[in-house]
Image (spheres, rainbow, N blue to C red):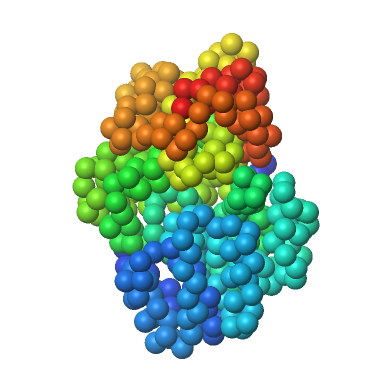
Amino acid sequence: MAMPFEFSTAARILFGEGKLREAPAAAAAMGRRALLVTGVPPELAAPLVAGLEAAGVACLPLPVAGEPTIEMVRRGNEYARAERCDLVIGMGGGSAMDAGKALAAMLANPGDPLDYLEVIGRGQLLKQPSAPFIAIPTTSGTGSEVTRNAVLASPQHRVKASLRGSSMLPRLAVVDPELTLGLPPDVTASTGLDALTQLIEPYVGLRANPMTDLFCVEGVRRAASALPRVWEDGGDRQARTDMAWASLLGGLALANAGLGAVHGFAAPVGGMFPAPHGAACAALLPHAIAVNIQALRARAPASQALGRYAEVARLLTGRSHATAEDAVSWTSEICKRLEIPPLRAYGVAESDIPGLVEKAAQASSMKGNPIVLTPQELRQIIERAI
Ligand SMILES: [Zn+2]
């Protein structure tokens, strides 16, 4: 456990059913012309739009379909500048929130997204703080409402890379579980398992700290109980609230303690294949846990990560004598129950394994993994997830 530590998050968080109604007044204190980046059907955004207009904030809509690309941010930035926007709102899943977060950064900084993008860009620092940004999640999964990076795809490079900066943290996060009531079961399943992954990886990882540990323990317990309920009945308000809470906790944890092998693979898989982020994470999760435990037992039997996996297993199963390996069986079972398809469903084939292993080994998330995995071990993870 790293002590001392640093912790930072969104300046303000509003959580609970109906909290969306408080967003317009908060927005009016930040600007007069809002770029509204949405990834949701217009009827879901309509109450927000009406509230903003009533509060004297003009709404410039920018609907986005799918995960944001560099080109989409370029075009959105031209639009936002032409319309003299002074505030950005991202409402939707991780894609819309990340698009909004990237646009808030580009609105305040000169140049092109590639000037600032990691890995495939020039990686320059964002000198100016982002324009005020409000994040409103409509899924319970990414935690993007409290993270300081935006993941952008470059279809040309077939990779995803982050725009990152401490001033990219949202000014306000509005987490209203009511917005998730209408999600279809497959989205509920994949985003929910992403949330669970984002609670397990920071907890067992190298950068865990005492504050993120609190969030992870609470979040894993909530998600374990709520995931089966929300799958059976998407209208279960208590289960939806529990998942929104778990997702927020995962975001708080990952933004401050990093991730691990699942996300190390999810980046190249998502860049090369049309697999939604949550679905890729879900398919990888049990296998990454299994291989990590096996590697720790073989090469670092004294690592405290083994005790942490056992704690995760106790939280997942509710059994006080659960062992680390029980975390593997519990996560495999929930993936089956929630009908998570293997990665081959998105076109990932045997022949892609060497390339994916190479890219995953370089991924920034892999640095948080509790042990450095060998290429053979990385191969085992992806082989089993296909
Ligand atoms: Zn994730």
Counting the numbered discs, the total is 0
Q: Residue at x 58, y 63 (%)?
A: 72
Q: Position of residue 213 (x, y in %)?
A: 51, 39
Q: Is residue 110 left or right of residue 358?
A: right
Camera-side residue of 258 and 311:
258
Q: Is residue 283 left or right of residue 266?
A: left
- 114 to 312, vertically: above or below: below
- 238 to 299, vertically: above or below: below
Q: Is residue 56 left or right of residue 120?
A: left
Quadrant in the rendering for residue 316: top left
Q: Position of residue 341 (x, y in %)?
A: 37, 34
Camera-side residue of 176 and 158:
158
Q: Is residue 351 left or right of residue 161?
A: left
Is the N terminus in the top left, top right, bottom left or bottom right quadrant? top right
Q: Residue at x 64, y 75 (%)?
A: 78
Residue 54: in sight, yes or no? Answer: yes
Furthest residue in direction top, as rendered: 298
Q: Position of residue 5 (x, y in %)?
A: 65, 44
Quadrant in the rendering for residue 320: top left
Residue 206: in sight, yes or no? Answer: no
Q: Residue at x 53, y 20 (%)?
A: 380
Quadrant in the rendering for residue 30: bottom right
Q: Position of residue 160 (x, y in %)?
A: 61, 47
Q: Residue at x 32, y 27 (%)?
A: 333
Camera-side residue of 351 and 305:
351
